[in-house]
Image (cartoon, grey):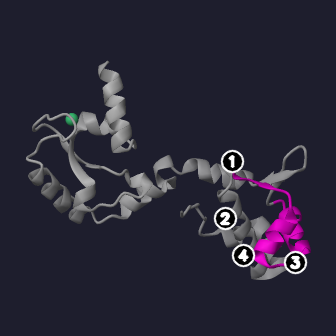
């Protein structure tokens, strides 16, 4: 899974970064961003203060990691001293809308929109413009991924079905089985 984080285009000229580069050159700069990448993958963007792990991952000396983390004010430490994080990085992550952070949305975002509309037109036509979940005809129709997109479901015709807006909202990321069970329970 790919995760993204914002990188200021002038980061290299930030005062702290300049100090980092004066001491460690572009290697230090690379290490700094590699640490942020590791942080990005962690919950709450905090990293355990174990320089051995990072040194092993990046194949650079332990002392260099320690210096990058501790000598330039680029990171803050938790009170117990066991973890460190970057306040400015956390702030920047909070600013990106959730939908940009999610892999699924990024995939949708990048999807060829025109092609997508052609596909759903075929889906609606094949299903006679009838919601395949509740049998309602017409109205606001949507194409639903039978195997949810987030579970790796494809955009192929056989994974798409016509759904009214209401059913689609109710199904959300449920699998077909889960959705049917959910509908049955609701009717009782
Ligand atoms: Zn429906």
Q: For the residue labelled by badge 4, is the local secondary structure a helix, a strand or a loop?
A: helix
In this figure, which residue is indicated by the disc labeled 2? 37
Cβ at disc 1 under 8 Å from ligand 1? no
Which badge, 4 or 3, is on the more N-terminal residue? 4
Measure the C-alpha gap from mark 1 to mark 4.
22 Å
- Residue for badge 1: 44
User: What is the CA distance from the residue labelled 2 to the residue labelled 1?
Assistant: 13 Å
The answer as to whether callout 3 falls within 8 Å of ligand 1 is: no
The secondary element bearing badge 2 is classed as helix
Identify which residue is drawn at 40% across, 44% down: 173
x 85%, y 57%: residue: 49
- Residue segment shown in magenta: 45-73
Tell whether label 3 touches label 1 (CB within 8 Å): no
Q: Is residue 51 magenta?
A: yes
The numbered mark, 1 or 4, whose residue comes first in the sequence reads: 4
Q: Residues within 10 Å of mark 3 (few under 14, many from 20)?
A: few
Mark drawn on residue 30: 4
Secondary structure at numbered mark 3: loop
Prevailing secondary structure of the magenta residues: helix
- Residue 23: x %, y % from top left: 86, 77
Left or right of 28 in this view: 126: left
Vertical side of 166 occupied by 174: above or below: below
Q: Marks 3 and 2, how far apart in space?
A: 18 Å
**Of pointers 2 and 4, the one earlier in the residue sequence:** 4
Secondary structure beneath label 1: helix
């Amino acid at each position: 899974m790919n995760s993204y984080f914002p990188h200021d285009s002038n980061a290299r000229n930030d005062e702290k970064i300049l100090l980092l580069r004066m001491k460690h050159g572009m290697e230090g700069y690379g290490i700094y961003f590699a640490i942020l990448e590791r942080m990005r993958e962690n919950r709450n963007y905090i990293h355990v203060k174990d320089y051995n792990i990072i040194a092993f991952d990046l194949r650079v000396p332990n002392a260099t990691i320690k210096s990058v983390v501790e000598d330039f004010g680029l990171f803050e430490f938790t009170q117990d001293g066991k973890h460190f994080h970057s306040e400015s990085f956390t702030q920047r992550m909070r600013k990106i809308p959730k939908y940009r952070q999610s892999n699924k949305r990024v995939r949708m975002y990048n999807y060829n929109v025109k092609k997508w509309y052609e596909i759903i037109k075929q889906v609606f036509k094949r299903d006679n413009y009838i919601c395949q979940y509740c049998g309602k005809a017409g109205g606001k129709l949507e194409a639903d991924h039978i195997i949810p997109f987030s579970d790796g479901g494809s955009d192929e015709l056989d994974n798409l079905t016509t759904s009214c807006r209401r059913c689609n909202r109710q199904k959300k990321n449920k699998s077909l089985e889960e959705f049917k069970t959910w509908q049955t329970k609701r009717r009782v």
